Image: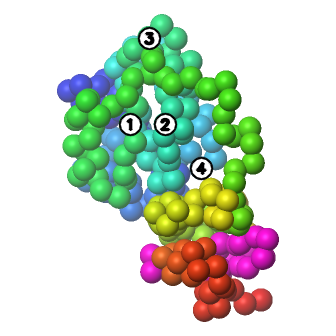
Amino acid sequence: MKTAIYARVLFAGPDLKHGSFAELTRRQFSEQFGAAVLEDLFDTGAGYDELWARVRECLNANELPLLLVDLDPLGSSPQLDWLRGELQALAGERADQLFACAGNNEDVVALAKLIQQPDKHLGCVEVPQLPASHSWSCIPPHRYRVLLCNGPRCTRRGALPLWKLLREELKAAGRLETVDGVHITRTQCQFPCDQGPTLSVYPSGEWYRIRDAAEVRCLVQQRFVEERAVPELIMRA
């Protein structure tokens, strides 16, 4: 995809190639940007190799400047910094021609506006460096370890936006990576798939089925704020 500002715009994130979510996203992107945009969608569920190969092609063909839009619904500031760092390493002296931003593929109209707003795009030259002492060298403070299933069937049942909301609700409640709170880890298939989306809580060993936003908020309030089990959401063997 090309714009008046960028010679190439690439989009990267999970669920962009196969499955129901991908089908909907690809249809909406085609309607908003034209069918040619589908060649610039890169599914990162299995890794970033295809995306990096395409960036190299753009560099070799001098398709610059280039914008990479991160569509991961669970993305974060450190992830965007990592992407910018990888782009900087690939581009070398031409890193000043590469840019990145985070977008929401569920709102393609807003995404189209974002692409046209370079003041909201970040360069790949002065990327924040890793600090000498960083939080990921230590076990995060927590009372509960929560495992979120990102397997294919839970994902098709709508897990990703629910897990994003879970993180937001935990943070708002003051229970995200605190001494009395939750440390989140994403996993692949946990089973049982037919009861998903699946979320498990340790050390208590409870397995929950979380189907919508109301159940996310109920779980946060009752299990992690009031610290009591939520029997109506617990999976049964």
Residue 101: mark:
1
Q: Earlier in the sequence, mark 4 or mark 3?
A: 4
Q: Earlier in the sequence, mark 1 or mark 4?
A: 4
Residue furthest to the top: 93
Q: Earlier in the sequence, mark 2 or mark 3?
A: 2
For disc 2, the marked residue is 80
Q: What segment carries the magenta color?
A: 191-214
Which of label 1 and label 3 is nearer to you?
Answer: 1
Q: Residue at x 49, y 28 (%)?
A: 84
Marks 1/4: CA distance? 19 Å
Determine the secondary structure under disc 1: strand
Are the residues at dot 2 and dot 1 in contact (C-beta closer than 8 Å)? Answer: yes
Crowding at label 3, few (<14), some or many (≥20) Cα neighbours within 10 Å?
some
Q: Amino acid at mark 1?
A: Cys
For the residue pair 33 and 201, the one nearer the viewer reads as 201
Marks 4/3: CA distance? 28 Å
Crowding at label 4, few (<14), some or many (≥20) Cα neighbours within 10 Å?
some
Q: Earlier in the sequence, mark 2 or mark 4?
A: 4
Q: Amino acid at mark 2?
A: Leu
- Residue 38 to residue 172: above or below: above
Q: Residue at x 33, y 31 (%)?
A: 121
For disc 3, the marked residue is 94
For disc 4, the marked residue is 45
